[in-house]
Image (cartoon, rainbow, N blue to C red):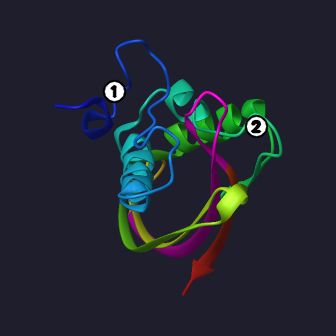
Amino acid sequence: MPAEQTGRGSSSGAPIDPWQGRPGAGSLDNLRKFVHLWFGWLDRGAPVERLVAHLATTNLHLELPEGRVSSYREFRNWHAGFAMRYRRIRHELHEVVVAWDCDEGYTVDLRCRRITQSMSDGVERVAAFRQKWHVRTAPSGALEIERCQTQQIG
């Protein structure tokens, strides 16, 4: 199975680049695949470095349901808390819309339902939110999430 389908990365350990940084035929579909991979990594408890490899090295600004992140260190702390907070987690993605912003990269607008089971009380909870991402292609050709805005729905 290709690396981008398994989420294991390339054999060289380099970050996954589903379309090798080239806009064009199929690139928006491949960006949608990357979005699904990202949430799959969160759901399966992937090592934090797999996720960090796909965060922007500069101008990082993530507004996540649990707080704001603007550095790799803050993301690692967020991820550790996330992993300790939930026994199980599942994201159901809906309406993943991607668009190319010419030289600016790509925007992703998605709606998601997150089903979690708390470590503390074992209770299952459901939350719905909308996220807007800005994704760019790094000089290495890897996809990087630069910005994320989250809005709770309902």
- Furthest-left residue in view? 1
9 lies above or below 63: above
The residue at the point 62 percent across, 62 percent down is: 133
**Of the two numbered discs 2 and 1 in the rendering, the one whose residue sits closer to the viewer:** 1
Residue 8's mark? Answer: 1
Residue at the image position 79 percent from the left and 37 percent from the top: 71
The image position of residue 65, as x and y in percent, is: 63, 62
Residue nearer the viewer, 84 or 6 = 6
Q: Quadrant of residue 41?
A: top left
Residue 148 visible from this viewpoint: no
- The image quadrant where one finds the N terminus is top left
Identify the residue at horizontal 23%, vertical 31% (top origin): 2
The count of marks equals: 2
Type of amino acid under label 2:
Glu
Tell me the crowding category of disc 2: few under 14, some 14 to 19, or many 20 or more residues within 10 angstroms, Cα based.
few
Foreground of the two, 29 or 5: 29
Between 150 and 134, the residue placed more toward the observer is 134
User: What amino acid type should be assigned to the residue bearing mark 1?
Assistant: Arg
Image quadrant assignment for residue 99: bottom right
Q: Is residue 140 left or right of residue 58?
A: left
Label 1 neighbour load within 10 Å: few <14, some 14-19, many 20+:
some
Do the numbered discs 2 and 1 sit on residues whose CB atoms are within 8 Å? no
The C terminus: image quadrant = bottom right
Whether residue 123 appears in this view of the structure is yes
Q: Is residue 53 above or below residue 121?
A: above
